[in-house]
Image: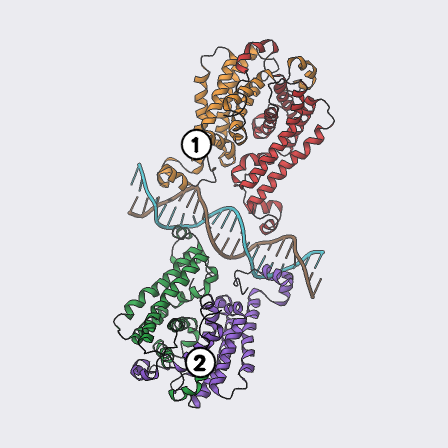
Chain colours: A purple, B green, C orange, D red, E brown, F cyan
Amino acid sequence: MARQGYHGTSMQDVAADAGVSVGLIYRYFENKEALLAHVVTGIMGGYLRRLPPAMAGFDDPVLRLRAGFAAYCEVIDEHRPGALLAYREGKSMPAGVLDRVKELELETTELLADPARDAVAAGIMRERVDPFLLAYDLSIFGHMWALKHWYLTDRITLAAYIDQQFALCMSGAIDAEHELGYRHVMSPSAIGGNA
Amino acid sequence: MARQGYHGTSMQDVAADAGVSVGLIYRYFENKEALLAHVVTGIMGGYLRRLPPAMAGFDDPVLRLRAGFAAYCEVIDEHRPGALLAYREGKSMPAGVLDRVKELELETTELLADPARDAVAAGIMRERVDPFLLAYDLSIFGHMWALKHWYLTDRITLAAYIDQQFALCMSGAIDAEHELGYRHVMSPSAIGGNA
Amino acid sequence: MARQGYHGTSMQDVAADAGVSVGLIYRYFENKEALLAHVVTGIMGGYLRRLPPAMAGFDDPVLRLRAGFAAYCEVIDEHRPGALLAYREGKSMPAGVLDRVKELELETTELLADPARDAVAAGIMRERVDPFLLAYDLSIFGHMWALKHWYLTDRITLAAYIDQQFALCMSGAIDAEHELGYRHVMSPSAIGGNA
Amino acid sequence: MARQGYHGTSMQDVAADAGVSVGLIYRYFENKEALLAHVVTGIMGGYLRRLPPAMAGFDDPVLRLRAGFAAYCEVIDEHRPGALLAYREGKSMPAGVLDRVKELELETTELLADPARDAVAAGIMRERVDPFLLAYDLSIFGHMWALKHWYLTDRITLAAYIDQQFALCMSGAIDAEHELGYRHVMSPSAIGGNA
DNA sequence: GATGAATGAGTTTTCATTCAT
DNA sequence: GATGAATGAAAACTCATTCAT
């Protein structure tokens, strides 16, 4: 299903692949949507379980953030086809499941937002940084590894990708000496609500 | 189709929505796949056409990059449902179309990579920045606006989003005074091929 | 239509092939069935018109029969694809047309039955020969040339085919000296109605 | 399908007639063409199986040929609608199946050609008789019984039909005493290749 | 519990037919 | 008269789901 997409995979395909009968699948899953829900939330839950142990042991919030980001990218890389499912098949999920998926995604992002918040509080990160948006960006970079793998795979290694993206988020692209000159176009003026 | 997904939209739906008969659609499109191809490449082509005029008139490469990124986010925001199609329905496209979509995506990213290259050449951006990866990240931030709109929409305005993401990419999250301390975890050591 | 079959030929095909618009065809023919009817009865009528001139000028009934059979085979050979239509597409015709086709077929056969009757009356053909069945057989041999052309074409020429089949019908396969011995298995005992 | 023609019979019709669901038919047959192929080759194969037992037990080649012809006509009569399918639906079959049908037809004809060859070899049949063409004619007479049943059925019984056609092929229509006079129009001159 | 044959609603696609221009 | 864009009913085929064994 991860390989062929939700609609490209029939229940008979799933059964054949699993070496069981279609009937048996229906004993464990209400219907095809429930199967998708199980698979997707399983994958998302996997992320959630992998991050804490990887982040443990780092007192420095930036190092903790980095460890979390690296672990995130790695677990995505290990289950690349599965990682795409949640992205692609949102339309195929019943509302309730989609909400649960979003929730899991937020929880995962929250795991990365925590050290970001700590870093801001500790004065290591600039005041104007939105810890959650930073965490979100890092998680997106993780997904991007799966989504754009066709392009990235023969340009950069996973380790370098993690390195580069993290460095970009941390110290930016612009040389410190020029930064001042661009202050006006990077003003965090509009941050806030939508009203 | 943008709203319900490729598989969630029957040709009857398309016809009813367009106020024409099914048969007429088949006069203009070989089959459903061809319709998807037309829609998706049309959307992607639209991006490509919008960026150059928006970027013209800026001599400074960073300002040009910013204008391109802003335009990119705006055009995506205007056609949000359509923007998701290309992401989600890769599996539904015949190989040839998928290749064309990837090509268009690269062309668009190239438009953003140009000023980034100029900035590095001009010494405005740090040497270690990969201009293409930076452009890719910005384009991803654009897509992310569509993809995660459910979450972002009531947290941040589009203008603020553009501002924040661009600022992050440019000057980074870490305060200049602390940057030196993290040099070791942001070393671009592994940058390069896959060998 | 003769080449691709009734169902394999759309009205748009017919129009394109004829270099006119679909609408124009519907000005001349009520519907597709009527077009088939016109084509088929036209072909059958063509047979009917070709036989009399070919048979004229032969006083001897056997020679007249032979001339008719030869002409029949030749006209079929000239319009082979068309000849198959009447055979194949019986199920596609409205009852009335099918009846007309059968009628035309009987009329054609009648043209061959006439000299056969004369030959029997003149004592040239054996008493037990059914002139109509003989005519029918000859007409079948004609159709067979079209129907089994894939097989016959590289085994025998049309001229030889006409020759052979006519000779078989006239003088039979069994040598005269042996004929007597098989009289019992060729008795025309059961000839007659079905009632 | 035999009654209404291939195109005149929808899969729904087939399913309803068979008392099963459409889906079930697709479990046993790839598609509609495969169903036609199965039906037609089944029928043709049936002919092939019926002839040998019917022909066994006759030492005399002419009697063996007659028994074969009679059996052929009878099996066709028993499955009249089916017999027409192969004739009519050649255009509806995929190339491979059509080839198989032709092959089966040749095999069946070969069963009749064998005794004809024996008869010629034994000097019972005239030298100039082409055993295969004779067999082909007889098989055509068999098909003709199905094809022209609408006409023949109330004119002649099957038994009489078999009798008459066989007699015609064997001893011909022309009285022995007149045969000599027509020798010139029945010369087997052109028999042979197509060059 | 486990199976997989059977179901039939739903989908894509075709094409005879119409009718405004 | 001539056109061909537009229609929509009908056909082939798929597959999630059920249920007798």
Q: Position of residue C130 (x, y in %)?
A: 59, 18
Q: Which of A97 and F20 is in front in this view?
A: A97
Q: Residue at x 55, y 9 (%)?
A: D181
Q: Residue at x 44, y 21 (%)?
A: C50
Residue closest to the far right: D57
Residue closest to the far left: B57
Q: Which residue is drawn at 52% across and 63% down?
A: A5
Is residue D3 in sight in this rendering?
no
Is residue A182 in sight in this rendering?
yes
Q: In the image, is residue C101 above or below residue B93? A: above
Q: Which amino acid does label 1 sit on?
A: Val
Tell me the crowding category of disc 2: few under 14, some 14 to 19, or many 20 or more residues within 10 angstroms, Cα based: some
Q: Where is residue D17 in the image (x, y as percent from the top left)?
A: 60, 44
SS class, disc 1 = helix
Q: In which quarter of the image is residue A49?
A: bottom right
Q: Mark 1 points at which residue?
A: C39
> Image quadrant for the N terminus of chain B?
bottom left
Q: Which amino acid does label 2 sit on?
A: Ser
Q: Name the residue under label 2.
A: B187
Q: Position of residue B89 (x, y in %)?
A: 46, 63
Q: In the image, is residue A136 above or below residue A15? A: below
